[in-house]
Image (cartoon, helix red, strand yellow):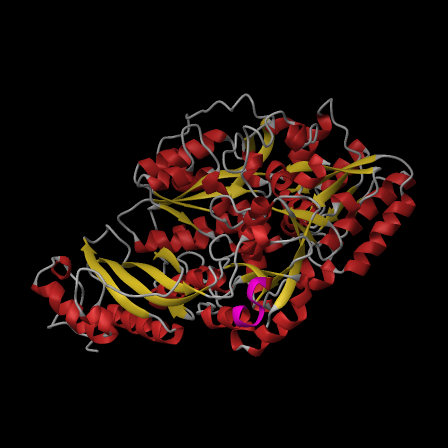
Amino acid sequence: MKYLNEYRNLEATKGYLKLIAQTVTRPWQIMEICGGQTHSLVRNGILELLPEEVQMIHGPGCPVCVTPLQLIDKAVALLEQNVIVCSFGDMVRVPGSSKSLLEAKAIGGDLRILYSPMEAIKIARENPDKEVVFFAVGFETTAPANALSVLHAQKEGLTNYAILVSHVLVPPAMEGILEDKFCNINAFLGAGHVCAIMGMHEYYPLAEKYKIPIVITGFEPLDLVEGIYMSVKQLEEGRYEVENQYARVVKEAGNPEAKKIIDTVFEVGDRAWRGLGVIPNSGYVLKKTYQAYDAEVKFGIQAMTAPENPDCIAGQILKGIKKPHQCSQFGKTCTPANPLGAPMVSSEGACAAYYHYANNLISS
Amino acid sequence: MDSTNKGYTSINLGHGSGGLMTRELLDSHIFKTFSNPYLDQKHDGAIFNIEGPIAVSTDSFVVSPIFFKGGNIGELAVHGTVNDVAMCGAIPKFITLSFIVEEGLSIADFTTIINSIKSAADKSGVQVITGDTKVVERGKGDKIFINTTGFGAVHPKADIAASNIRSGDKIIVNGHLAQHGMAIMSQREGLEFESTIVSDTTNLNFMVKDLLDAFGSQIHLLRDPTRGGLASILSEIAEDIKKGIQLKETSLPIEKQVAAACEILGLDPLYVANEGVFVAVIDKAIEAEVLALMRKDSKGKFATCVGEVTSEHPGKVVMQSAIGGKRIVSPLIGEQLPRIC
């Protein structure tokens, strides 16, 4: 398989691990932003292959984990109003205040698990007498397709389609973490697929302002060990630059066509992050001209709120202040079968990744 | 067999009434197709003899879509139960066959399913000895559900029990993983994608019999990793026997196309369902002979050793990743759901 086995090569990986070990002279904490990277690090057993000086901190880049509880409740409320709710698979098991989307489906809600919002457009077209809502979660990566679905609905004159938006942006989250007084991050692995859309320009001011290396990194084992090596090398040499490990996918300017589609439909606005609270200018909201496609407005559910479970320390996990197994609820009252908070639900959530793949690391 | 039923083109509630319409449907579809001395008695049940210890297994089949690449719900219902009986170290002989049909299923589809059941039963060497047909209102079922129960004679040389497993035992699978689940996935509403992945649904009882003939009690355990995939079965075994299981990622037999589809959908092939795969935990001394025997069978061509039982990390399955790291393979929790990015 092109671009897959090459990046899971034992010898090449060993080579980078050796370089990391030879380069590192003191402890460093590196945060991988994206949940996909966390998943790969743990699933491939990379954490235990790193020298002990290099500590990986698992960042907030799991869209499921940072989607606020009230958004789940809103989606459940739509299901209860006989709306066809379409969602990526990850979202459906996340517990809301009273129930998850999957539980709402079990008692009669019409929930569809999709891979693409364009499928939701098809469903809206085929069900003209029903309302259809796509649960538009995710970072910059999923925003173009979600925006495109709105443009298609407009073009086709589909008045029964709307999106429930919970789009968040990576750079403001990084800034939020860096501003936290408990922040102990020395370098970032940038989220490769986010940068494939957005490009690299947003990261230069961050690296400069906080004097922190940012290495845009891919998701395969070899990508990750190379990204970690590039970070360690910068740290040891006292540099703080934006570097691109994932050059086979990420271009300096990103994907201009995708950005144009985002800018047509969305504008930057304040967003609540689960566990982190409201971060100013940290997400996308639908532009006024596209408000007809805003499910919150259309169904009058803007005002719904929901308090988080006080036992869940998702905020500290997402900021990298605590590791999953340092939570007193981890693996006890909080398990993937019965999660207290979102990081235990999504396969990309740090808690679930630790629970599934790394309890050997934790118990030993 | 006729694909119409006295002018009806689809099944309706009358076909489940127990009256004349039911009789006609059974006569034209069930009794004619599966005719054998047990069924032909037309009793409320069947009377049969099996010498020695008997293995019984029951299973209900609710797969959607009912027709998929490589098979349909009918043959799946035969293979699933035949394989479960075989995993007990037994030679399957008889199966029962019960349908719950949603009104509106076309007689043509019903006929195709019946014919597949007949063909799968013949190939597996089992006879349908009794059954039942119920019809439910539209919206109360999903086209057709099938329950089968299988009976088999335990092989005289078999001694299948998790308690027989020793450290050092080898873990063998007969073929490629994750084929069935990915074939179904590629046809699910909302997830359709172009692929030529076909389900691996098949009967495994003859290969199991060959193994038991040749190696008897040196075959310690047999399981078929259907729902939950290989990961869930092995986790269950490790927990039961309080020993560890070591897997090697690079040894897992996964077809390129299936691996690619799993990557695209964000699914782990270790958790994806199989319908023509079994796991044999065997004495390490017979590894080479077992593999040689299995590879002679077309259903065992890709037989391979994927790991072994160890006294380390009791109760846990640990896999060595392709890049030399280690990870725990935990059982599947809930349904495996596709990831976002």
Tell which of A193 and A229 is nearer to you.
A229
- Quarter of the image for the N terminus of chain A: give it: bottom right
* Left or right: A250 in relation to A186: left
Q: Say above or below: B232 vs B292.
A: above
- Seen as rendered, the residue at the extreme left is B20
Q: Please, what is the dominant secondary structure of the magenta stretch? A: helix
Residue B67 seen = no
Q: Provide residue B271's location: percent of width, then percent of height.
A: 54, 53
Determine whether A321 is above or below B214 in the image: above
Q: Quadrant of residue B91?
A: bottom left
Q: Is residue A310 left or right of residue B189?
A: right
Residue A295: in magenta span: no
Residue at 36% x, 62% y is B151
Which stretch did the figure color magenta? B212-217
Q: Is residue B213 magenta?
A: yes
Q: Is residue B174 visible?
A: yes
Q: Residue at 70% x, 36% y: name it.
A: A362
Give me the residue at 47% from left, 72% from top. Answer: B206
Image quarter in which the C terminus of chain A is found: top right
Image height check: is A307 above or below B301?
Answer: above
